[in-house]
Amino acid sequence: MVLVAGCSPKISVTVQEVNNEWHKLRTYKYIHPDKIPPANFTFSDEEKQLLFQSVANELTERGFGSVKEADLVIKIQGGRFQYSERQSVNQDPFFNPYYNPYLYGNPLWDDRDTAVKEVHLIIEIYDATTRNLYWWGTANKQLESKEGLIEMVDAIFNEFPIQPENTQKGD
């Protein structure tokens, strides 16, 4: 089952539950990022720490504990990348009284290349002994600040099969 949900218009989330035997597993540990083969994009060390803490908070709220010999292994991947996007900007004098058509060419429209910064986040949860995938979630968002990373983790874990005791799934 693949579930696609939009928690806000700016975050695109996809999750899939591969194994539903969560009642047996209650502890987790991380795959250290230095042991993951390098990808085409990565997070800074500060962003990695923020992500690890956010995921730990989400799992703790759901009754999971962090231990060295754990039932589950968490793998976090992703990063930032930047690309250019062409946008048409209205330069009509009624919208922009400072526009001078004699200096800039086309009096009504101006095409500009704009830098777009997008973040991709992938969280995978494996069985620590068999290495079988239990669950994964991804999120994509145009992002400017590190606080948006926490929103992305929250959006992914809103679709996690085990919700905190004090809330229901979808709240």
Image (spheres, grey):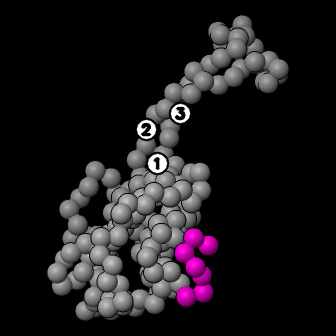
Quick check: marks 1 and 2 in contact, CB under 8 Å? yes
Which residue is label 3 attached to? Answer: 114
Q: Residues within 10 Å of mark 1 (few under 14, many from 20)?
A: some
Instruction: Please report the residue visible at 52 percent of the width from the left and 49 percent of the height from the top.
Output: 142
Please determine whether, in this image, residue 35 is positioned above or below residue 12.
Answer: below
* Count of labels in the image: 3
**In terms of depth relative to the viewer, which is nearer, 14 or 64?**
14
Q: CA distance from mark 1 to mark 2?
A: 8 Å
- Residue 83 at x, y percent in the picture: 43, 38
| Membership of 67 in magenta stretch | no
Q: Amino acid at mark 1?
A: Glu
Magenta segment, prevailing SS (helix, strand or loop): loop
On screen, residue 67 versus residue 162, left or right, reads: left
Name the residue at the front extreme: 1
Quarter holding residue 108: top right
Label of residue 83 in the image: 2
